[in-house]
Amino acid sequence: MKQELSNILKKIINKKYEIEEVTVSKSNRPDLCDFQCNDIFKLAKIYKTNSVELGEELVKTINEYEDFNKYFKEVTFCKPGFINIKISNELINKYIKLIKENEKNLIKQEPIETYVIDYGGPNVAKPLHVGHMRTAIVGESIKRIIKYMGHKTISDVHLGDFGLQIGEVIYGILRDKLTIDDIDIKYLDNIYPEMNAICKENEEIKEECANITKALQDGNEEYRKLWKKILEVSKQDIKKNYDFLDVSFDYWYGESDAYNYLEETEKILLEKNLVKESEGALVVDVKEEKDTKEIPPLLFKKSNGAYLYASTDASTILQRKKDFNPDHILYVVDNRQELHFTQVFRTVEKAGIMPQEKLEFLGYGTVNGEDNKPYKTRSGNTPKLENLFKEAKEIFISKKEENKNMSEEDLNKIVNAILKFADLSNTRTKDYIFDLNKFSEVTGKTGPYILYTYLRINKILESQNKNLELSNNIYNEPDRDLRIKLIEFNEAVNMAYKERMPHYIAEYVYNLCVSANIFYQNNHISNMEDETNKNDWLYVLTQTNKIIKQMLNLLVIDIPSIM
Ligand code: ARG
């Protein structure tokens, strides 16, 4: 829309003045106009004349343009140099029809690129918590947005499956004299927190667990058998949680898979003279002159020969390059890991494995409790993700008597909407406060509000003829406002895509729902006599719901059958 308006204005202005580019932006006085153009100042400067005179003259020319009505309803000059634009019904309706035909008509086509998206990243044998939900949802949403834009996506969960926690759990299994068949999720859920606490107190045991981890990485048969079983049990549990969230991955690689590429990565680093020895360890210097804060060297190999988190991430980039040759690799990881990724990205660039411009760290903020500290239960524990799902369900059910009778499937969809909309409507990089009570209200900027709006519109549409034509009329302000909101969806998607920020879509779909609610509070369709008017409104509402549904899909939210 903005592009089309810019083009037409440029064409008209060029009749009198030469101008390279005309910019049209959304009006910041929506009560006065839909769009504005601020280029008069620029033009007046070039032509060394007064902006008021020039502006008034140009607005007159625009008003005399032979196809004025096709684009504009009203174009006025606003001192000292603004063109205020109200667009025509014809233009608005043209875009509504484009949405009906295929809303992707309004999405800019770009050359197709390949994106690897690394999100989820749970650590095997550790229970999932609310932070894991954030990377899963944000990552899945970003993946869907990129796919929607027409690109190829490859998702990889990048399990933490080879770290110290495995050594700790194996230590526990040996201590408790378990057989392989005794290892189940209940045992894992308890043993990791227990061992973690023990290791914090007892240096010797911690050392022992580190040795087990190293022996596992070096191929110890007994440990590998136990590890495989731990992996199997833990992955099953992780998958169950992701299934509930409708989050899926093309690849279930883990840090352990990067071990196949460590040698080659190390060789490249050595050949390029990038590694230094420091107290027996191998490090890569990555600081740069432009740095404003100290960037320490990347630790590639410890003095005992063990590889680390940074080495596996660097090697994984080599693996991804070989397997997928991607144009971009995106990492949806906790903000607090930014330094780690700076070190990794600089290392692989220096090594000529992949330039930094292809690598993006997409940090996300912490999910906090009322006290602004990472979310905990009342008893001070980090709650298991599964229990949060349960809690959200209970809170939603407690809001209304009828909610008790809903099907399990619908309830699960609503729980998803509650959690995801809350998460995704917050800016990715910012922390937010986890308040299930607020998130599950049916009013306000919540998932249930969006679902409720959709279902209410759906009810109006249910019994109606679906094959409608759109006339050229627009009947009142709420109607006009809804139509204009509707045709702005592509801008929200574009912003979300460009900045890898799903909240633009959440914000948009909320505003669309607000307009839709105002629309049907003012306009009663069911008892309308004027057939054309009725058809037009059904047409607009059909497209509204099409867009709400599509936007919800990009936010990984499914719609229940009733609410
Ligand atoms: N497992 C890691 C953690 O819990 C997150 C993994 C993120 N992805 C990556 N390629 N490093 O901190």
Image (cartoon, grey):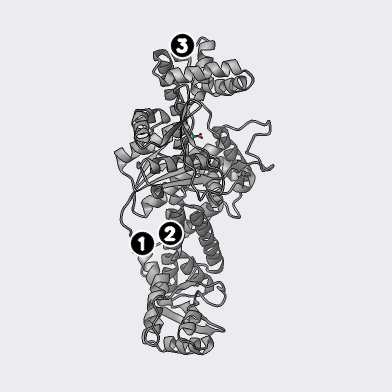
Q: Which mark is residue 271?
A: none
Q: Which residue is mark 1?
A: 108
Instruction: Mark 2 or mark 3: name the one nearer the start of the chain.
Output: 3
Q: Looking at the image, is mark 2 or mark 1 earlier in the sequence?
A: 1
Looking at numbered disc 3 in the image, what kind of residue is underneath it?
A: Thr
At mark 1, the secondary structure is loop
Viewer-closest of 182 and 19:
19
First in sequence, mark 3 or 1: give its number. 1
Q: Residues within 10 Å of mark 3 (few under 14, many from 20)?
A: few
Residue, x 52% and y 15% (percent of image)?
A: 171
* Residue carrying label 3: 179
Residue for badge 2: 494
Cβ–Cβ under 8 Å for marks 2 and 1: yes
Q: Secondary structure at mark 2?
A: helix
Q: Is residue 37 above or below residue 403?
A: below
3D distance between C-alphas at marks 3 and 1:
58 Å
| Image position of 251 (left or right of 453) | left
Q: Residue at x 43, y 71 (%)?
A: 2
**Could you say which quadrant of the image residue 469 lies in?**
bottom left
Q: Nearer the viewer, residue 329 or 268?
A: 268
